[in-house]
Amino acid sequence: MKIEILGMGCPKCRMLYENAKNAVQASGIQAEVIKVEDMEKITGYGVMMTPALVINGEVKTTGKIPSAEEIRQWLA
């Protein structure tokens, strides 16, 4: 599973990254959590507002920070 955090490194982006890592840990799944700061890649997903969360190529949320529990539910 591949989880991408789209954003330019702002505090909200870092918080979303931590929530995603915590969700992966809590769910016990194997997943790669990566930060994407390349604006071309971000806009390639059609994302105009960051932070954004992408799971296996599907944009799940933009412009907000879902909790680790909410992310864990998407991973299930």
Image: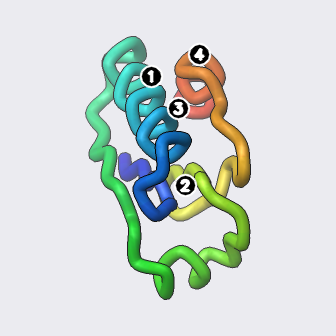
Q: Which residue is drawn at 55% across and 41% down?
A: 12
Kindly identify which numbered label has been placed on residue 75: 3
| Placement of the C terminus among the 4 image quadrants | top right
Lower position in the chain sequence, tag 4 or tag 2: 2
Q: Tag 3: residue type?
A: Leu
| Residue at the disc numbered 2 | 54
Disc 4, disc 1: CB below 8 Å? yes
Which residue is identified by label 4?
Answer: 69
Query: Label 1: which residue?
Result: 23
Splitting the image into 4 quarters, where does residue 72 fall? top right
Q: Which of marks 4 and 1 is nearer the N terminus?
A: 1
Q: Do the residues labelled 3 and 4 touch (CB within 8 Å)?
A: no
Q: Where is residue 25 in the image (x, y as percent from the top left)?
A: 32, 18
Task: Tell me which residue sits at (47%, 33%) in the image.
Answer: 15
Residue type (three-letter) at the residue carrying disc 4: Glu
Q: Which amino acid does label 2 sit on?
A: Val
Instruction: Say the numbered circle drawn on residue 14.
Output: none
Marks 2/1 in contact by CB < 8 Å: the verdict is: no
Tag 2 secondary structure:
strand
From the viewer's perspective, is the residue at label 2 or at label 3 nearer? 2
Which amino acid does the dot numbered 1 rest on?
Ala
Disc 4 on helix, strand or loop? helix
Sequence-wise, the earlier of marks 3 and 4 is 4
Disc 4 from disc 2: Cα separation = 16 Å
